[in-house]
Amino acid sequence: MRLQLKRPFRDGTVAVEMDPLSLLCRLAAIVPPPGQHQIRYAGVLAAAAKWRPLVVPPPPSTTPAADGTDGAAAGKGKPRPATHRCVYRSYVDLIRRTFAIDRDHCPRCGAAMKLPAIVTKPLSIERILHSLGESTVSPPLAPARGPPYARNRVFRNKSLQHQPSDLFDNP
C-alpha cells in the first residue's frame, strides 16, 4: 500500500509504502483506549497531587439551605467527601467484559456457577496440574521476530536524490 503525502518532507520523501498490517499497527498505536481522557494534567493540577486542593477551587454546593447559606455551613454536618471512582468488579464480570464469556451459568446444565478459589502459590498450582495430568513445565518461548513495518520503503523525490533507498539501510 502506497500513501502519497500532501507535501514532501524536508528530506524529499513524497510517499511511504507499507503493507496493510504495518498500517494497522501504526493506526492502532495512536488510538486511545476507551474511556481515557485526552487531556492529562501534570504537576499541581494532576489528580493525585498533594497540593491540588490548595490550587483548584472546590465545586459549588448543589444543596443550598432554606436561609440561602450553604447546607454544610448551616449545621447539617460535614460536607460529604468526593466519591471514590474505583468500583469492585467480580471475577465473573471481568471474564464477561474481557472475553465475552458468560460464567454465571453452566454451559451444560444452566445452573448458577461460583468460583471456589483462586490459586496463586506455585506449589499448589503444580500439585493441581499434576493431579489433572497436565504438564507443569511451561512450553519454550518462540524466537522473537522483527516488527512488520521493517519492510516499509520510503520513496524520495527523484530530483532530490538519485536512487530510492530503504528506510532502515541508512545508518
Image (tube, rainbow, N blue to C red):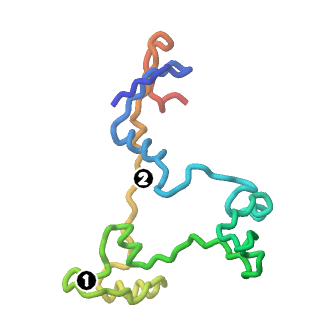
Residue at the image position 42 percent from the left and 88 percent from the top: 117
Q: Please provide percent x and percent y for residue 91.
A: 42, 78
Q: Residue at x 56, y 20 (%)?
A: 10
Distance of mark 2 from mark 1, alpha carbons?
A: 39 Å
- The residue that label 2 is drawn on is 144
Q: Residue reaching furthest top?
A: 159
Q: Quadrant of the C terminus?
A: top right
Q: Amino acid at mark 2?
A: Ala
Disc 1 target residue: 106
Residue mark closest to the camera, 2 vs 1: 1
Q: Tell me the tag on residue 16.
A: none
Amino acid marked by disc 1: Cys
- Return the x and y of residue 33 as percentages of the image width and height: 47, 54
Q: Position of residue 35 (x, y in %)?
A: 49, 58
Figure label count? 2
Q: Nearer the viewer, residue 171 or 154?
A: 154
Q: Is residue 75 above or below residue 42?
A: below
Q: Residues within 10 Å of mark 2 (few under 14, many from 20)?
A: few
Q: Identify the element where label 2 is drawn.
A: loop
Q: Residue at x 41, y 39 (%)?
A: 149
The one nearer the camera, 5 or 71, is: 71
